[in-house]
Image (cartoon, rainbow, N blue to C red):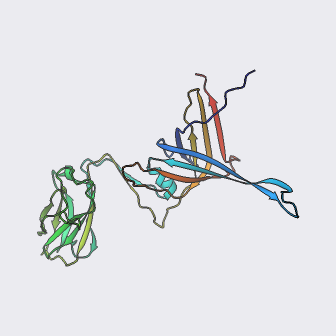
Amino acid sequence: MALSDPRGIYGVHSVTPYNRKTGEFYGILKVLNGSSLNVEGSLVELMGGSSKFPWAVETGELKVEMSLKISQFEDFLFELFLGKAPTQTSAEAAGNVSTLTSVVTGVLNASTGIASVSAKSGQSASLKFAKYVIKYVSATTVDVYAASDVDAARGTDWAYQTDLLKITASPLTVTASTATEIPGTGVEFTGGSGVIALVAGGVATFETRPINSGVSTVRIGGLANQTMPEFGAIVIAQKRSNGEMTELDCFRCLGSGMPIGFEKNAWANAEIKVKAFYDSAKDGVFDLRYVKATS
């Protein structure tokens, strides 16, 4: 009888985390640069006397660590490794303009300042992915600044006027109970109901989003309800040409931390370290399944 072909594991197909309590899948990771499970053992030597060699050797602790090398950033990763599930918003057919928020008192005021900002009718196509600052110029005028020009050319565009990121060529006048357009942004602000009297140093800010198919937002680092949950994970190797398929099911995993890269002309990559450990209900750490399909 001839020897069988050697069994091998080739590539990686997917990693699927799942909820340990409900068994439901969080989602699937398929844009992977690698996923490995390292079972690291130790050998404990008995040393003593004048011998330069061990009298005995026994096996010590085993540690199981998974390395996930990913190039996709799904919402569930933020929940598993940074402790907070993002809030998802359905498609916004007209884009979105956030509420005007005061940073330094003096610009936002329902009576004597700017009462609100909103999308200008018919200008939704010019709403950009941007954050803006409105700053006092005089008792009745303001200038507007933008944090980035990454989306400035959408619809009617705007351009920076100064190195301080001002986008208004000349100050805009705030008029009582009247809307004033911020050129190129798709946004207008409305003056307060009384006599306009802006206060020197006043600053307010708002954000806009373009027409979109969905939005995800998350704030990381809060003190309340931000803990990394335990999860299970199924790792599948690439299907081989001879029909071999290999699966790892790690019953109980925990990870903490996730790099988020912004590199020049490159896709973001992240390597996440995950510990796999004993599940008393299943009396084990992981299962390995192998099959060689015949058809």
Residue furthest bottom in the image: 200
Give 143 or 3, whichever is nearer the viewer: 3
From the viewer's perspective, is residue 202 above or below residue 18? below
Residue displayed at 48% across by 52% down: 270
Residue nearest the viewer, comparing 159 with 294: 159
Q: In which quarter of the image is residue 171?
A: bottom left
Give percent across and percent down for residue 115: 20, 68
Of the pair 231 and 46, the residue shown nearer to us: 46
Which residue is found at the position 27% from the left and 59% from the top? 148
Rendering quarter of residue 162: bottom left
Q: Can residue 26 be seen in this view?
A: yes
- Residue sitting at 17 percent across and 63 percent down? 161
Asked if one can make out residue 99 in the rendered structure from this viewpoint, the answer is: no
Q: In the figure, is residue 77 to the left or right of 109?
A: right
Q: In this view, does 123 lie to the left or right of 267?
A: left
In the displayed structure image, the side of residue 141 where residue 288 appears, left or right: right
Image: 28 above or below 177: above
